[in-house]
Amino acid sequence: MSARRTLLLGALGLAVAGGLWSLSAPRPMDASALAALDGDARAGSAVFLAAGCGSCHKAPGREADPEILSGGREFASEFGTFIAPNISTDPEHGIGGWSQAEFINAVMRGVSPDGRHYYPAFPYTSYIRADPQDMADLYAYMMTLPADATPSRPQELGFPFNIRRGLGLWKALFLSDDWVVTGDLTEQEARGRYLSEALSHCAECHTQRNALGALDTGRWLEGAPNPSGRGRIPAIAGPDFDWTEFDISAYLESGFTPDFDVVGGTMADVVANLQQLDKEELDAIAAYVMRAR
Amino acid sequence: MTLKRFLGASALCAAIALPALADDDPAIAARQGQFKLFSHNFAVLGGMAQGRVDYDAEAAQTAADNLFHLTRVDQGRLWPEGTDSASVEGTRASPDIWDDLDDFVAKFGALQEAAETMQEVAGTGADEMRAGVGAMGQTCQACHEAYRDEAS
């Protein structure tokens, strides 16, 4: 190979690497837009329930106190074990010292205050579709919750998944704020889509993932293997799902299936949260699920 | 209920002596049949509570009586060790049951209590029954959340 060609290839390689490096850079939200938001803690408590933050961040073994968000729950995956961190108001071990903008960038963009990427086990992949005002309300609410000084544990991931910078490329490929179910939606269906696709992240459990761990939008809500390795998360769309709108709303309200089996597994927490919302919100989710299939 | 009464001393011995039987242990189908009967009767009350059918005091009382008696069936031979979802096919019983039997038994006890209350209120009025349904459902849910795997 001539010296010139080597040089050319070298330059090309550097350009690609540089491109990947800048492609993988964190992309925070527009700071001035966030600064203008003023949160309302009362409204934020409903967002907290709809978004299910507590399901992942409450302490295992301390379920009786669902407001203590000291983390420690483990989530098995093909890539290793993710561990939910402390997001209580403790200034050292939690997020008590975070600004509203830092909080919203974490939840809606998966970027930490010091500019690192979070893993999508934290479903910012859904929350990216949220209304920033709802996130400001959520921030105001979460700042009223108790502090707990339990330290967060590091994620237990093997190489190469332990390199956070690589997540930037993953985000460039898969992170999108587009709605998945589109078309001419009624106002109720659109509200249901907002709750389901942005906040309650139904698809994060009910949709199959590809080899890189991203949701397969072509099989939206059609069921998925259980990340725990035992059993499957059931389909709530597609030919195998024949519930009515009434059935779905009643299940989210009571945990009872149309055959009066009773909800269990990770869905039990989803029901426990959603049943505290207004019934119209559950009807809207049901209307969306009917529409999604 | 004590643990020993729940499981029966003989069941514990049999489970330790004969683990190889677990694969087609008839206890699995038997306990699943028991839970189907729970649902079959709970559906009568739940259907009325959700307004799918009109409240009928007599039908409600019959279903509540059934649930009372069904939840008194001796569990002694229904939960042999080695019949968990990690050891054998065809069951959703989480291995955690056997790691924390005291808690599992306590959760069954909560259901028995709820069934007793239900028996007292089911025939007395739609609102009373509806409250009983919610309370009873909570006890089913608490156990399923902790100890029942997702279906395959």
Image: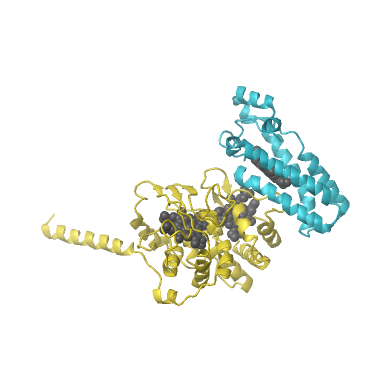
Chain colours: A yellow, B cyan
Which of A157 and A214 lies nearest the eye of the viewer?
A: A157
From this viewpoint, which residue is outermost toward the top?
A: B17
- In the rendered view, would you say A224 is above or below A40? above
Classify residue B53 by image quadrant: bottom right
Q: Is residue A63 left or right of residue A89?
A: right
Q: Quadrant of the C terminus of chain B?
A: top right
From this viewpoint, which residue is outermost toward the right?
A: B58
Q: Is residue A5 left or right of residue A232?
A: left
- In the rendered view, would you say A105 is above or below B102? below
- In the rendered view, would you say A159 is above or below A17? above
Residue A165, position as x, y percentages in the image? 33, 57
Name the residue: 69% across, 51% down.
B138
Residue A97, position as x, y percentages in the image? 42, 64
Q: Is residue A60 left or right of residue B73?
A: left
Q: Is residue A146 left or right of residue A276?
A: left
Which of A62 and A256 lies nearest the eye of the viewer?
A: A62
Residue B13, position as x, y percentages in the image? 64, 23
